Amino acid sequence: MLLAQLADRARDVDQAGIATLLVGGDEAAAIYQRRIDRGARELGIASRPERLPADASFGQVVGKLAELDVDPEISGILVLRPLPSHLPEARILRAIPPHKDVEAQHPENAGLLALGTPRFVPSTPAAAFVMLDSYMRETGREVETAYDGVDLVVVGRSNNVGKPAAILGLARNATVISCHRHTADAGRLAEHTLLADILIVAVGVPGLITGEMVRPGAIVVDVGINPVTEPDGSVRLVGDVDLDSTIAVAEAVSPVPGGVGPITDAWVLHNAILAAQRSAGAARHADGTHLIETLGRFGVLRP
Ligand code: NAP
């Protein structure tokens, strides 16, 4: 459905295209690269799944980013993680051209997001709020005020998910608590999660959050995607939230698989189209789709 919404917008821009750069052979990153490639093709925008070997040098990676910077077919660039350990991640993220940095990984874009004037909103936290907004509307709440003063607890503080989710919550006037490994090590995780009207969990530990840690009536967004091997050797994906115990107390819980994941993919492509519209000077011509409404609230469509 989201891709169908985007397809109309993709037709309006000549030069939208996404490049994904995978260094090495991480299997989860390779799967993600294929998904983005498929989505871009479905939308009819250019797709460039780039690969460099695991022993690629810093110079090779930066050289590839410089090539993509001047490539007129490519409006968005995504560097896939994890990067091989010999590569300096922070320096590589600084080499992404900011106007094509669809995951807001460059410090300039991370800073703009923190200041409340984002150029791009990173896909996974954006997807969490697309889902929350949609749920608020479905349940008759006013999206404009649904977050005002509510307790939003975010578990996980990674630069790509937890931290920007907390920033987006603040931008929506929620009261935000950010929890992480040290909160858990101090034995105080449940104390905080039990406060949450809205709980966003992005950790990478299967079933970390159980029903006893959730306030009755809370809305829970499970960002975690964790492969778990069954006794028969099959692998299934589970979230960070124990669904059975949590569904018994929460108002709503997002599913894994499904839930945040597919929205994340659509958002990356959306940002590539947005970048193309901007470079064509057309970014203000929003068409009122749900995704664009959400972007507008985050301030992305500001001239
Ligand atoms: P990450 O970079 O490994 O960060 C994990 C965060 O969780 C860190 O902030 C860490 O705290 C915190 N943490 C670890 N153990 C904890 C514990 N026991 N209690 C509380 N906090 C704990 O992971 P990520 O990239 O944010 O991803 C998190 C999860 O989301 C993973 O399952 C990943 O697969 C999934 N994910 C899903 C999507 C999607 O599209 N749905 C996209 C990206 C990621 P410290 O900072 O103190 O170490």
Image (tube, rainbow, N blue to C red):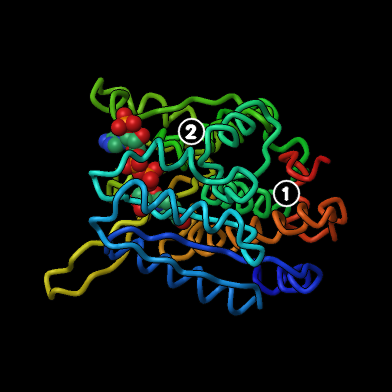
For label 2, count other residues whose C-alpha is less than 10 Å away and answer few (under 14), some (14-19) or many (20+): many
Q: Secondary structure at mark 2?
A: helix
Q: Is residue 209 visible?
A: no
Q: What type is the residue that disc 1 sits on?
A: Thr
What residue do we see at 56% from left, 34% from top?
Answer: 110
Q: Which residue is mark 1?
A: 294
Q: Quadrant of residue 229 in the image?
A: bottom left
Q: Is mark 1 within 8 Å of ligand 1?
A: no
Q: Secondary structure at mark 1?
A: helix
Which quadrant, please, contains the N terminus? bottom right
What count of labels does the image hold?
Answer: 2
Percent across and percent down for residue 157 are 41, 33
Q: Is residue 62 visible?
A: yes
- Please tell me which residue lies in front, 99 or 297: 99
What residue do we see at 78% from left, 67% from top?
Answer: 13
Q: Quadrant of residue 89 in the image?
A: top left
Mark 2 / mark 1, whichever is N-terminal: 2
Q: Quadrant of ligand 1?
A: top left
Above or below, 248 relative to 230: above
Residue 224, disc: none
Q: Which residue is mark 2?
A: 163
What residue do we see at 45% from left, 27% from top?
Answer: 178
Q: What type is the residue that disc 2 sits on?
A: Lys
- Please tell me which residue lies in front, 167 or 28: 28
What residue do we see at 39% from left, 28% from top?
Answer: 179
Q: In the displayed structure, does residue 214 sit left or right of residue 12?
A: left
In space, the residues marked 2 and 1 are separated at their CA atoms by 19 Å
- Please tell me which residue lies in front, 169 or 14: 14
Percent across and percent down for residue 291 are 71, 57
Cβ–Cβ below 8 Å for labels 2 and 1? no
Which quadrant, please, contains the C terminus? top right
